Image (cartoon, rainbow, N blue to C red):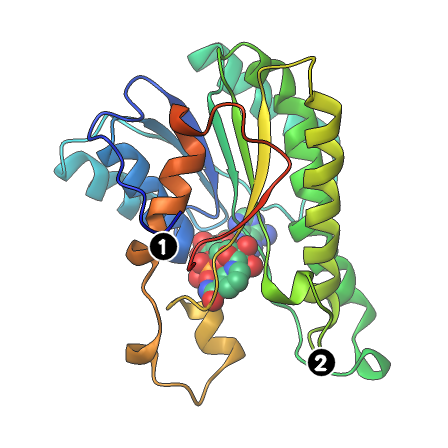
Amino acid sequence: MGNYTAAPDLLKDKIILVTGAGDGIGKTAAKTFASHGATVILLGRTTEKLERVYDEIEVAGGPQPAIFPLDLNETRIETFEYFAEAVSQEFGRLDGLLHNASLLGQRTPIANYHFGTWQQVMQVNVNAAFGLTKVLLPLLENSPAGSVIFTGSGVGLKGRAFWGAYAVSKFATEGLMQTLADEMDGVSNIRVNSINPGATRTSMRASAYPAENPNTVTTPEQIMPTYLYLMGDDSRGVSGKQFNAQS
Ligand code: NAP
């Protein structure tokens, strides 16, 4: 959907949660959704980064966002339930959920992979996405057309040496997306899809490919058409699919 053109008011009056909204693709997605009329809930672990995104949205004239600092390395479901209750009190529904936050972890052979790092990557990339989805489903059901987007990766479709827990977590992400999409099929207005951003100029990409010249890499802004398509009503009825943002 790289050639999709979104109407300026595509997301008017929609309430959209973005995880990992303080940096990289999540930051650009939050600002882009707001620029198309959405009220965005900015979730991330670094409050100062979220505050900067909040300020940038306000300066650009977007709807006033909400900030929710949360470390997704959190394992208690009560923390997610508290968050869902806060969203319920403030907004009463959720129209969009972009699972974007992820940890890269180590780039090393499985034989050497640190057990604790493995657990953290699986927690942030998979378990937290499951926990958040579970507690937010009732609020997504309150939307006339809720959209859930998971973030995949090329290494989540075909395993690759030294990508360890990150690759495995992205396979699991596709599984979570497909399972939830199938459960929603025919019984809910919620659609569920995933986006593989492709190589994108962020600090995660720079950590994975330190020798690469960042100027040769696609920017987060360039991949936004796919995010807008899946978040807006033009994708109603589309579910269970994996999208490549750069094709
Ligand atoms: P990024 O620049 O590293 O940004 C990741 C965001 O997730 C940051 O805002 C980070 O917060 C947040 N985050 C990490 N751990 C968290 C935690 N425990 N709790 C809450 N928030 C946490 O990464 P990116 O490149 O934008 O990646 C965004 C998504 O695209 C990820 O799912 C990634 O796997 C996927 N992806 C990226 C590429 C690429 O080339 N960039 C390619 C394929 C897939 P802090 O800023 O506070 O650290």
- Give the quarter of the image for residue 177: top right
The residue at the point 79 percent across, 74 percent down is 114
The residue at the point 25 percent across, 31 percent down is 36
Please provide percent x and percent y for residue 13. 31, 17
Looking at the picture, tell me which residue is in the foreground, 96 or 204: 96
The quadrant the C terminus occupies is bottom left
The numbered disc on residue 2 is none
Task: Read off the residue under disc 1.
Answer: 223
The residue at the point 14 percent across, 32 percent down is 61
Residue 130 in sight: yes
Task: Read off the residue under disc 2.
Answer: 162
Looking at the picture, tell me which residue is in the foreground, 4 or 148: 4
Please provide percent x and percent y for residue 105. 65, 69
The residue at the point 64 percent across, 32 percent down is 132
Q: Amino acid at mark 1?
A: Ile
Relative to 44, say whether 139 is above or below: above
**Does the residue at mark 2 contact the one at mark 1 (Cβ under 8 Å)?**
no
Relative to 83, say whether 121 is above or below: below
Residue 67 in sight: no
155 horizontally vs 52: left or right: right
- N-terminal-most mark, 2 or 1: 2
Relative to 190, say whether 92 is above or below: above
Q: Amino acid at mark 2?
A: Phe
Please provide percent x and percent y for residue 176. 73, 41
Looking at the picture, tell me which residue is in the foreground, 118 or 38: 38
Determine crowd level at label 2: few under 14, some 14-19, many 20+ residues with C-alpha closer than 10 A.
some
Estimate the spatial distance between the alpha carbons at disc 2 and disc 1, rounded to whole Å.
26 Å
Query: Element at badge 2?
Result: loop
- Give the quarter of the image for residue 188: top right
